[in-house]
Amino acid sequence: MILAVGGPPGSGKTTVAERWAAARGYVLVSAGMRFRAMAKERGTSLEAFGKAAEADPEIDRALDAAVLAEILSKEASGASVVVDGRIQGYLLAKQGIPCIKVLIDAPLAVRAERIATREGKSVQDAKREIVARERSERVRYRQIYGIDLRDTRIFDLVLDSGRKTPDEIVAAIAARVGG
């Protein structure tokens, strides 16, 4: 089985995916971690790397192809996979790959506070970076894949993590998917 956990920056998608994998023995594939690693390899911030990806669609294509290949490889070997990433649910749906798609969201203020705490920056800086990143992603994903990030109809479950703990989100997913 494949569980795709999507959502905007700071929504909790990676935390939830990590906890799901640990509790249920799933293999974790993280598009967000890969993107951060790619930015770090280039010695640039996420914001600057996002701008580079706007200018060079091959950055996103290479990332997304690698994530998809890893998902399919792990599943082919018999593993259950949980993937977290902004657009992985959309891409799996476009490919016709069966999976459960979960969208986690939270108000911008909550997401900015989470990112500020995690990355040791001000909430104001985190909010500015989130807004810029989301703007960049909306443009890139529409141009490259025809994905509208505001269209949530592909998701089997949509959860607001603003007032829920990661464990409550995991429990809600388990109640929906049976596990």
Image: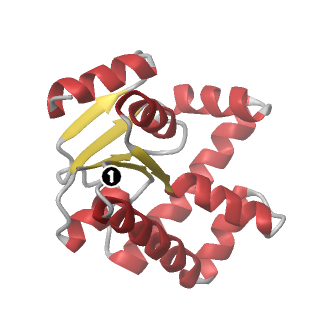
Residue 146: quadrant of the picture? bottom left
Q: Is residue 19 above or below residue 65?
A: above
- Percent position of residue 133, x then y: 59, 55
Q: Nearer the viewer, residue 174 or 42?
A: 174
Q: Which quadrant is the C terminus positioned in?
A: top left
Residue at 25% across, 55% down:
151
Q: Which of 82 and 48 is in front in this view?
A: 82
- Percent position of residue 79, x then y: 33, 52
Residue at 48% across, 79% down:
61
Q: Mark 1 points at which residue?
A: 79
Residue 125: quadrant of the picture? top right
Q: In this view, does 97 lie above or below 152?
A: below
Element carrying mark 1: loop
Q: Is residue 57 left or right of residue 7?
A: right
Q: Which colour scheme is used?
A: secondary structure
Residue at 17% across, 59% down:
98
Q: Is residue 86 above or below residue 157?
A: below
Few, some or many C-alpha atoms within 10 Å of disc 1 (few <14, some 14-19, many ≥20)?
A: some
- Percent position of residue 7, x then y: 41, 44
Q: Is residue 45 left or right of residue 83?
A: right
Q: Label 1 amino acid?
A: Ala
Q: Is residue 39 above or below residue 122?
A: below
Furthest residue in direction right, as rendered: 43
Residue 50: quadrant of the picture? bottom right
- Percent position of residue 106, x then y: 43, 30
Residue at 53% across, 71% down:
63
